C-alpha cells in the first residue's frame, strides 16, 4: 500500500490548468488568481483511512476525512456540494467528484518518496498536474 503520510508543498503545475479551470466553469478573474495560489497538503494516513488538510493562500483551510473505497460529501469554496467516491487504482488514490452539472477526476500518486503528483481531469478531458514536494 502506498504511504502518502507527510506534509507536501506544491512546487509546480504541468499541463493546461487554465483550460481545466475553464472546463469547471471558473470565471477568468478567478482562474488568474488560482494560478498564483500556493498550497500545501498535510496528509495523515492509517491504512485506507485518510485525513487531508489543504492549506492555500487566501482561502479557508479545507479538511477531508475519508476511507479509500468509500465516499464523502464535500462543500467547494463556491458553496457547491459534490459527492466524492474514492478507490485504490494500482497504488494511486482515484477520486471521482460529482457535482450537479458535471463530473471530474483527481488522482493522487507518489512519483517517488519525495514527490507527490495530483492529476486533474476535467469533464471535457482537459488535464493538468500539480507537483508537490515533501516538506
Image (cartoon, rainbow, N blue to C red):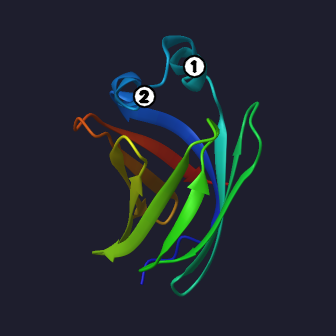
Residue nearest the viewer, comparing 113 with 87:
87
Residue assigned mark 2: 21
Kindly identify which residue carries mark 1: 30
Q: Nearer the viewer, residue 112 or 73?
A: 73
Q: From the image, which quarter does the C terminus lie in? A: bottom right
Residue drawn 50% across the image and 53% down it:
82
Q: Is residue 123 left or right of residue 31?
A: left
Q: Residues within 10 Å of mark 2 (few under 14, many from 20)?
A: many
The quarter of the rendered structure image containing the N terminus is bottom left
Q: Is residue 70 above or below residue 27?
A: below
Where residue 52 sits, quadrant-wise, is bottom right
Left or right? Give the position of 103 relative to 50.
left
**Image point 61% across, 35% down: which residue?**
78
Relative vertical location of residue 15 with respect to residue 61 in this rendering, above or below? above
Expressed as whole percent of the image width and height from the top left, the position of residue 64 reads: 64, 63
Residue 87 position in % (x across, y down): 37, 74
Q: Residues within 10 Å of mark 1 (few under 14, many from 20)?
A: few
Instruction: Give the quarter of the image for residue 90.
Output: bottom left
Q: Which residue occupies 41% across, 68% down?
A: 85
Camera sees residue 18: yes
Residue occupying the far bottom of the picture: 47
Q: Determine the secondary structure under disc 2.
A: helix
Pick the front one: 22 or 113: 22
Residue 120: % across, % down = 37, 45
Question: What is the secondary structure assignment of the residue under circle 1?
Answer: helix
Amino acid at each position: 500500500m502506498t504511504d502518502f503520510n507527510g506534509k507536501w508543498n506544491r512546487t509546480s503545475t504541468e499541463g493546461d490548468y487554465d483550460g481545466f479551470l475553464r472546463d469547471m466553469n471558473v470565471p477568468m478573474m478567478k482562474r488568474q488568481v488560482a494560478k498564483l495560489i500556493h498550497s500545501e497538503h498535510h496528509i495523515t494516513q492509517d491504512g485506507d483511512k485518510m485525513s487531508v488538510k489543504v492549506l492555500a493562500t487566501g482561502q479557508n483551510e479545507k479538511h477531508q476525512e475519508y476511507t479509500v473505497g468509500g465516499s464523502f460529501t464535500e462543500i467547494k469554496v463556491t458553496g457547491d456540494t459534490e459527492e466524492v467516491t474514492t478507490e485504490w487504482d494500482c497504488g494511486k488514490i482515484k477520486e471521482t467528484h460529482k457535482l450537479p452539472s458535471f463530473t471530474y477526476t483527481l488522482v493522487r500518486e507518489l512519483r517517488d518518496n519525495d514527490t507527490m503528483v495530483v492529476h486533474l481531469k476535467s469533464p471535457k478531458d482537459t488535464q493538468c498536474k500539480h507537483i508537490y514536494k515533501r516538506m
